[in-house]
Amino acid sequence: MKKICWLVLIIFVISNNIFAQIMNPPMIPTGNRVDWTVSGLTIQRPTAYNLIIDVTKPPYNVTPGGSASSNTAGLQTAIVAARNYTGWKVIYFSQPGTYNFN
């Protein structure tokens, strides 16, 4: 009888430990955590943009799966256009997919 009680107790302790590890996985120590709330932005986040360039529209015509040379030319044209404006600018890829560039 004592052997059965010890066996039940050992199984209970082991299963409790396994259950605790599954339900409460180890956390990353506080010193090793990364604050991603600003993710590289070191200045105040803008609330409005002066210019949004959708490179998938004319005159840029960058397309997912398009040729690398025409996509590169379209993106370079969008960058030049963005440089000519002051304030916040966004170069926007409105179509999902893989874009090819040189």
Image: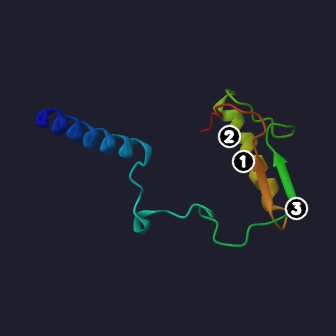
In the rendered image, the residue lying farthest to the front is: 1
Q: Earlier in the sequence, mark 2 or mark 3?
A: 3
Asked whether the beta carbons under mark 1 and mark 2 sit within 8 Å of each other, the answer is yes
Disc 1: which residue = 76
* Above or below for 61 versus 77: above
Disc 2: which residue = 72
> In the picture provided, is 91 more to the left or to the right than 12?
right
Mark 2 secondary-structure assignment: helix
Q: What residue appears at the point 26 percent right and 41 percent down from the top-left corner?
A: 14
* Above or below for 45 versus 61: below
Q: Earlier in the sequence, mark 1 or mark 3?
A: 3
Mark 3 secondary-structure assignment: loop
Name the one closer to the observer, 59 or 48: 48
Of badges 2 and 3, nearer the viewer stands 3
Q: Residues within 10 Å of mark 3 (few under 14, many from 20)?
A: few
Q: CA distance from mark 2 to mark 3?
A: 24 Å
Q: What residue appears at the point 78 percent right and 61 percent down from the top-left corner?
A: 83
Amino acid on which disc 2 is placed: Thr
> In the picture provided, is 22 more to the left or to the right than 71?
left
Whole-percent x, y for residue 3 in the image = 11, 34
In the rendered image, the quadrant that contains the N terminus is top left
Amino acid on which disc 1 is placed: Gln
Q: Residues within 10 Å of mark 1 (few under 14, many from 20)?
A: some
Whole-percent x, y for residue 37 in the image = 62, 62
In the rendered image, the residue lying farthest to the bottom is: 43
* Residue 93: quadrant of the picture: top right
Disc 3: which residue = 50
Residue 65, labelled with which disc? Answer: none
Q: CA distance from mark 1 to mark 3?
A: 19 Å
* Above or below for 85 versus 3: below
